[in-house]
Image (tube, rainbow, N blue to C red):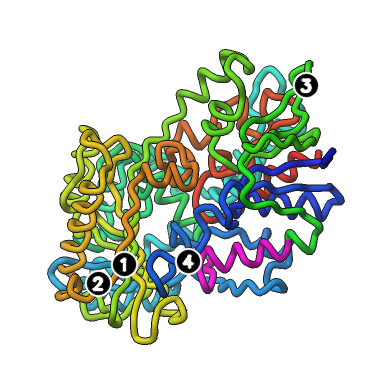
Amino acid sequence: MSKFDVIVIGGGHNGLTTASILAKKGKKVLVVEKRNILGGIAAGEEFHPGYSTTGLLHDTSGVRSQVVKDLQLEKHGLDIKSNRANVTLLSKDGKSVSIQSDVNATVEAISEFSEKDAQAYSAYQEFLKKISKVINDLMENPPPNIDVENLTMGSLVVLAKKGMMLKGLGNKTMMELLKIAPMCVADFLNEKFETEFLKAGLAAPALYGSYAGPWSAYSTINLLLWESASKNHVIGGPQALIAALQKAAIQAGVEIRTGAEVEKILLDNEGKVEGVKLSGGEAIYASKVAASCTPKETFLNLFDNFQLEYELDYWIDKIRSRGTTAKVNLAINKTVELNGRITEFARTGNSFDEMEKAFDPVKYKQVTNAPYLDIHIPTHSNPSLAPEGHSVVSVLVHQIPYDFKKGWSVDAKKQLGEHVLKELEVYSPGFSKAVVGIEILSPTDFEERYSLTEGHIYHGEHFVDQLVTRPIPSCSRYKTPVSGLYLCGSGSHPGGGITCAPGSMAAIEIIK
């Protein structure tokens, strides 16, 4: 009979992080991954003969430096730079600007079309620099215990320190932060900038994966969180992170099994975790299980009916995870330029009006014919992903509903691909003629391939009520009401994206 200290469900970046940290602390750990490859949404895959992506998502700017250090990932081949990758913001009139980690260089680039916006960008970055310490303190540590009935002196000290950090910003900065937190991102950036495509491009990360448009309340919070946490970039993208995490896990003694889908989590007669049962019928035993899959997948699909308390099932079911993202992978027979630039990362949006119009149909389960795009051309830094002289263009398509009223048929996905190509033609005339292969993944494909509930790339929406006590109050500190069961995926604090943060903080809680 197989027996482990901890079984980790899911071999994505968070699952591997949790497993590696636990193994380094002397625990006997097993990772079970339902797919035949590791990585989850960070897995690089061939989508057309000779052409490969580096993962479903593109952005590695939030990978936590402490995780890289603790797991010695650089010794395992990870090449991580201590600055964000440059990203080009695209305008439909042919203009573009490169947002760089070097603020002065970005200011100079913006000044070529707006001196006012150049000065505003410098002030914007100064403001972000001031508040990022407070925000990162909240997001890079386990959430404080806010259960008033069970507050300890230690919890009160933690809460007091966080309050003092906020006060330490000074009255002017503190009041500005409190003022803008409830704002929509359009109003926030309209106060600072005048150039439409610049505002749209800067706002875009606040809306990625969100059931929201630029005029949705509280969307500014998402922008501040992203700006504060985004510090690095991994050469080779998410796929390179997975390769290093796998090596670290193996060296630490983690046992990894792919093609091992969990059918259910096993409980003993007292309701405590005792292991998992795989889809083939095999039972594997452990006193603790850490689930890196979505909270809804964990509680609603991996337990028998009526096995859990009604209240837990009820609140888990209420988690909002309305997917609004699709993916189009393109094999291109040439080097790609966007608005005359060769760039690895680019964003479209053009204006808040166009972004809001793209969101409007989502509310009625319809699909816009003019989505905005998050574009990654990984062959810019890694030509081996495509034949010589060719390119891979990996596009995250935003404001695409999971619950499309007409259903995600082959024809519907084909039409989505046509909309994306039409948009790309604006920035790269003749683009469509260079396409030699295409893969279109709808939000329902995300659910099927990656077990992302409702196709949500972050395991649940990033809005204030689902960030403060993520995913629900009773599970907000990784430990759940089910004895021995922990959550370690993007559905937990501090949220989704390629960060390794939920996985690392969950491991600390499990070790206690």
Q: Which comes sooner in the sequence, label 2 or label 3? A: 3
The one nearer the camera, 252 or 303, is 303
Is 468 colored magenta in this rendering? no
Q: Residue at x 21, y 66 (%)?
A: 424
Check whether the beta carbons of the residues at disc 1 and disc 4 lie within 8 A of each other. no
Q: Which comes sooner in the sequence, label 1 or label 3? A: 3
How far from the left and from the top, in percent, is residue 135? Answer: 53, 48
Q: Which residue is mark 4?
A: 54
Q: Residues within 10 Å of mark 1 (few under 14, many from 20)?
A: many
Q: Which residue is mark 3?
A: 268
Q: How many angstroms separate mark 1 from mark 4 (CA)?
A: 13 Å
Q: How many angstroms separate mark 4 from mark 2 (CA)?
A: 19 Å
Q: Which comes sooner in the sequence, label 1 or label 4? A: 4
How far from the left and from the top, in percent, is residue 136? Answer: 57, 51
Q: Residue at x 77, y 41 (%)?
A: 6
Is 242 colored magenta in this rendering? yes
Residue 194 visible in the displayed image: no
- SS for tag 2? strand
| Secondary structure predominantly adopted by residues drawn in magenta | helix
Q: Which quadrant: the N terminus? A: top right
- Identity of the amino acid at label 1? Leu
Q: Residues within 10 Å of mark 4 (few under 14, many from 20)?
A: many
Q: Which residue is mark 2?
A: 435
Q: Is residue 200 left or right of residue 257?
A: left
The one nearer the camera, 164 or 269, is 269
Check whether the beta carbons of the residues at disc 1 and disc 2 lie within 8 A of each other. yes
Residue occupying the far left of the picture: 93
- Residue mark closest to the camera, 4 vs 2: 2
